[in-house]
Image: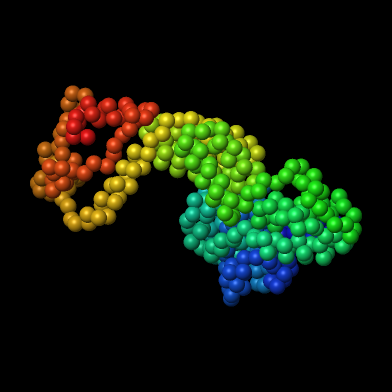
């Protein structure tokens, strides 16, 4: 069973060497740190946030505060067998603080295996995830944990981390303003990535040397894309990306996709935006768009980068090239607006009401309903709105002549004539 940190004799990365061992040395997450330090007794916690934001370090600090034995598991390499070993150990020695990294990679049944021990106090679970816990963590387990959301580190925090690292390992090395900015851009608010870059630069330079922009660019292999996934450029690039998709320019859309991927954007964020775009902007003009976007989201989630770029590229090029229609998007918003502004009571027509019991039938529920499949073309004109909406019921969906939606428009016109 591994501990939270490398043991004696191991080659220790810089990120581990300067890992804060006191609350005072921890940089960033001020609000979360204040909340955690105020906890008066051991409690299970879920740390949720991007990589390199301090999840593991916070777990280490809080366990030291509680003075509990600690064990480390990663959901990438561990399963129920390893969990049971920790649980059995807790029954022998008392409560154990278990840090479970990437808990979102555990299946629902694996997460369920934690519940009894967490409930009984055998385990104080300290879990970390980069995914939204509402979608990836069992509700029963989530309800037994306090959730703390961590943010990507800001520039001030990252500079503080670099300063601490140089004090310990720098041997007098310094950085020009331009080279420092390049390192910060490359790290993307990820302290682990930041320290990995710094460690590499230290290994390739001499003590007391001033490290310039050219050396940083050479180390990184190419100039870092000027893309801050947490600030203004993030919103500018995603805006240009969506507008290029909407404007049916696959080349421009792929360009902005490449900027985001090269700049360290979360590929799942991109995939989620594609799902929304497929429904909002492609809609019924190409009903293949939404299934492809959802399949892309699932593929990205399962295979990760760098391979995830391939399904992302396929989806982006298809959605950009597909015919466009926002009629269904406008339709649902129009219906919502209508409902919100017309909150008076209404009566469901008897022929549309459900009739599960004899009493309902005696009251007339379901009487007079005409089953469309019993009629030619599986259709019969009928009133489906409440009676008080006639003779001029509202119209929400106006299909366009774009792509496959043209067929829907022709079908509705054929069935309803001028009524639709």
Residue 141 in view, yes or no: yes
Provide residue 300's location: percent of width, then percent of height. Answer: 57, 40
Q: How is the image coloured?
A: rainbow
Provide residue 311's location: percent of width, then percent of height. Answer: 56, 34
Position of residue 394 relative to residue 115, above or below, is above
Please state the total of marks drawn on the protein image.
0
Provide residue 417's location: percent of width, then percent of height. Answer: 19, 29
Q: Residue at x 80, y 44 (%)?
A: 218
**Residue placed furthest toward the top:** 376
Q: Nearer the viewer, residue 22 or 67?
A: 22
- Left-right relation of 299 to 18: left
Q: Nearer the viewer, residue 305 or 217?
A: 217
Provide residue 247's location: percent of width, then percent of height. Answer: 47, 36
Q: Residue at x 62, y 58 (%)?
A: 152
**Residue 14, quarter of the rendered image:** bottom right
Quarter of the picture holding the N terminus? bottom right
Q: Nearer the viewer, residue 49 or 187?
A: 187
Residue 138 in view, yes or no: no
Quarter of the picture holding the C terminus? top left
Q: Residue at x 56, y 36 (%)?
A: 252
**Residue 199, quarter of the rendered image:** bottom right
Q: Nearer the viewer, residue 245 or 33?
A: 245
- Left-right relation of 252 to 283: right
Q: Residue at x 25, y 30 (%)?
A: 412
**Residue 352, quarter of the rendered image:** top left
Position of residue 150 relative to residue 257, above or below, is below
């Amino acid at each position: 069973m591994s501990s939270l940190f490398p043991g004696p004799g191991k080659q220790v990365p810089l990120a581990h060497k300067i890992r804060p061992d006191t609350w005072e040395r921890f940089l960033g997450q001020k609000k979360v740190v204040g909340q955690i330090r105020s906890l008066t007794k051991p409690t299970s916690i879920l740390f949720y946030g991007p990589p390199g934001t301090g999840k593991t370090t916070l777990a280490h600090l809080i366990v030291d505060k509680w003075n509990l034995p600690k064990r480390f598991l990663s959901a990438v390499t561990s399963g129920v067998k390893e969990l049971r070993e920790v649980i059995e150990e807790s029954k022998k020695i008392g409560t154990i603080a278990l840090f479970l990294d990437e808990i979102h990679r555990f299946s629902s049944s694996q997460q369920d295996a934690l519940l009894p021990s967490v409930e009984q106090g055998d385990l104080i679970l300290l879990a970390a995830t980069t995914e939204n816990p509402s979608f990836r963590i069992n509700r029963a387990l989530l309800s037994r944990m306090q959730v703390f959301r961590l943010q990507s580190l800001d520039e001030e925090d990252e500079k503080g981390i670099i300063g601490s690292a140089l004090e310990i390992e720098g041997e007098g090395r310094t950085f020009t303003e331009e080279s420092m900015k390049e390192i910060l851009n490359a790290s993307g608010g990820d302290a682990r990535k930041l320290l990995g870059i710094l460690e590499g630069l230290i290994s390739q330079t001499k003590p007391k040397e001033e490290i310039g922009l050219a050396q940083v660019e050479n180390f990184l292999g190419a100039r870092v894309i000027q893309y801050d996934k947490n600030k203004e450029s993030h919103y500018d690039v995603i805006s240009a990306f969506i507008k290029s998709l909407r404007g049916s320019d696959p080349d421009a859309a792929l360009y902005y996709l490449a900027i985001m991927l090269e700049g360290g954007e979360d590929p799942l964020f991109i995939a989620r935006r594609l799902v929304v775009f497929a429904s909002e902007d492609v809609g019924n003009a190409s009903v293949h768009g939404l299934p492809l976007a959802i399949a892309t989201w699932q593929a990205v989630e399962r295979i990760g980068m760098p391979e995830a770029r391939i399904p992302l590229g396929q989806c982006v090029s298809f959605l950009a090239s597909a015919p466009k229609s926002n009629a269904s998007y406008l339709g649902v918003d129009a219906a919502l607006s209508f409902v919100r502004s017309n909150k008076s009571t209404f009566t469901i027509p008897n022929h549309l009401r459900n009739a599960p019991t004899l009493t309902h039938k005696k009251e007339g529920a379901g009487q007079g309903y005409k089953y469309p499949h019993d009629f030619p073309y599986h259709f019969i004109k009928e009133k489906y709105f409440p009676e008080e909406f006639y003779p001029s019921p509202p119209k929400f969906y106006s299909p366009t002549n774009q792509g496959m939606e043209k067929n829907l428009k022709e079908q509705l016109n054929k069935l309803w004539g001028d009524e639709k």
